[in-house]
Structure formats: structure tokens, C-alpha cells
Amino acid sequence: MAEKRPKQRLRRPYTLLRDTNGATAIEYGILMMMIGLALLGMMTLTDVSNQISNTFNSVSDTLSR
């Protein structure tokens, strides 16, 4: 019986290394973060393009007077 205990202790790290359930959750989390950052970037670019458009319209109106 004394020989079985060290073998059982060595099995535990190997089973943890083969476990992939947590890795899938992390991958989904990273994927959702990337999608969120892309959406945030698109919203920011839309806001910036609207501000640039408003600036050009203001300059155009001022020059046409």
C-alpha cells in the first residue's frame, strides 16, 4: 500500500494537464472580448467620422457666405 500513494500523487498533475474544459471557457472569453473591442472601435470611428464631417460642413458653410 505504501507504493500506491506516490503513484496516485503523480497521476493528479497529469490529469490536470489533460483537462481542456477551462481552456474552452477562456477561449470563448477572449473571443467575446475581441468582438467587444471591435464594436467599440467601430463606434469610435463612426463618431470621429461624424465629427470630421460636421467640421467640413461648418467650414463649407462659412466659406460660402
Image (cartoon, rainbow, N blue to C red):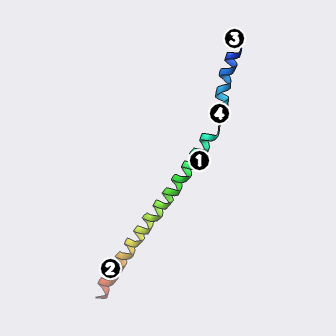
**Image mark for residue 8:** none
Residue that badge 2 annotates:
58
Is residue 45 found left or right of 55 in the rendered image? right
Residue 48 spot, x, y in % from top left: 40, 68
The type of residue carrying mark 4 is Leu
Q: How far apart are marks 1 and 4 (CA)?
A: 17 Å
Q: Mark 1 points at which residue?
A: 27
Task: Say whether disc 2 or disc 1 marks the residue closer to the N-terminus.
Answer: 1
Mark 4 and mark 3 lie on one chain; the one further toward the N terminus is 3
Q: What element carries label 1?
A: helix
Query: In the rendered image, which quarter is residue 47 located in?
Result: bottom left
| Disc with the residue nearer the chain's start (1 vs 4) | 4
Kind of residue at disc 2: Ser
Closer to us: 40 or 59: 40
- First of labels 3, 2 by sequence position: 3
- Please give the count of numbered marks on the rendered protein: 4
How many angstroms separate mark 2 from mark 4 (CA)?
A: 62 Å
Q: Looking at the picture, which amino acid does disc 3 mark?
A: Ala
Marks 4 and 3, Cα distance to the nearest angstrom?
25 Å
Query: Quick one: label 4, few (<14), some, or many (20+) residues within 10 Å?
Result: few
Task: Give the CA distance from mark 3 to mark 2.
Answer: 86 Å
Badge 3 local density, few (<14 within 10 Å), some, or many (20+)?
A: few
Q: Is mark 3 on a helix, strand or loop?
A: loop
Q: Earlier in the sequence, mark 1 or mark 3?
A: 3
* Residue 11 x, y percent position in the rendering: 68, 25
Residue on which disc 4 sits:
17
Q: What residue is at 61 percent from the left and 45 percent from the top?
A: 24
Quadrant of the rendered structure where residue 58 is? bottom left
Q: How far apart are labels 2 and 1 at the CA level?
A: 47 Å
Q: In this view, does 51 lie above or below 60?
A: above
Looking at the image, which residue is at 49% across and 61% down? 39
- Residue 61, percent from left and from top: 32, 84
